[in-house]
Amino acid sequence: MKKVLSFFAAILMILAAGCEKQDKTNISNSDIPNSFTAKAEITFKEMFLTAQVTRNESGELNVKVLSPDVLEPLEINCKNGVCSAAYDGISFAADSSRFPQADFALIAAQAFDYVQANIDLKKTLSDGITTYQGSTDSGVFVLNMDSESGNWLDLSVEGTQLHIIFKDFKRQ
């Protein structure tokens, strides 16, 4: 009987050694910048633009395009999964079927919403960078934060060809 119990105990220890435990308990909303403003370099599919990105306390994401010049009057607002756009005083719904170029704003807004709500996040810390990884309807995202300053550094969403680099980051 002792041999059988010892055998099962050894098997359980071997199986447990191969399991990785995700640390979700160290994610605190106070660590995560909810409202902020930053200049952003946005690459989405074959499009590159510079924008001022602002997220307010209620979770609304505003993207105001700074360059290229032809898009400078474009402003996109996303909240609760719905986006609208304004271009040179003309406002319209920015849904995928009519304006797929604005999808990047919705994809980014979803990632920020998921991080703020702490929905199935994996948090890792390496070389002064805190990485939040999760999954939205758009795909798996990786959002990196400078661990010392608490500023967002960049956001990538797998499968969407979206990469955003944040500069001049300021918490609001």
Image: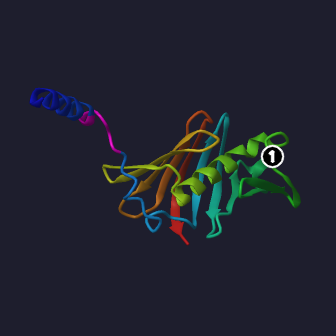
x and y percentages locating residue 155 in the rendered image: 53, 47
Left or right: 135 in relation to 76? left
The residue under the point 85% across, 52% down is 93
> Residue 160, relative to residue 3: is it above or below?
below
Left or right of 130, for residue 33: right
Report the front residue among 101 and 118. 118
Determine which quarter of the picture holds residue 88: bottom right
Q: Is residue 41 left or right of 83 when viewed as pictured?
A: left
Q: Quadrant of the N terminus?
A: top left
Residue stretch rendered in magenta on the structure: 16-21
- Residue 77 x/y as whole percent: 74, 59
- In the foreground, 18 or 66: 18
Q: Which image quarter holds the C terminus? A: bottom right
| Element assignment for label 1 | loop
Residue 51 colored in magenta in the image: no
Expressed as whole percent of the image width and height from the top left, the position of residue 59 reads 64, 64
Vertical placement of residue 30 versus 71, above or below: below
Q: Residue at x 60, y 56 (%)?
A: 113
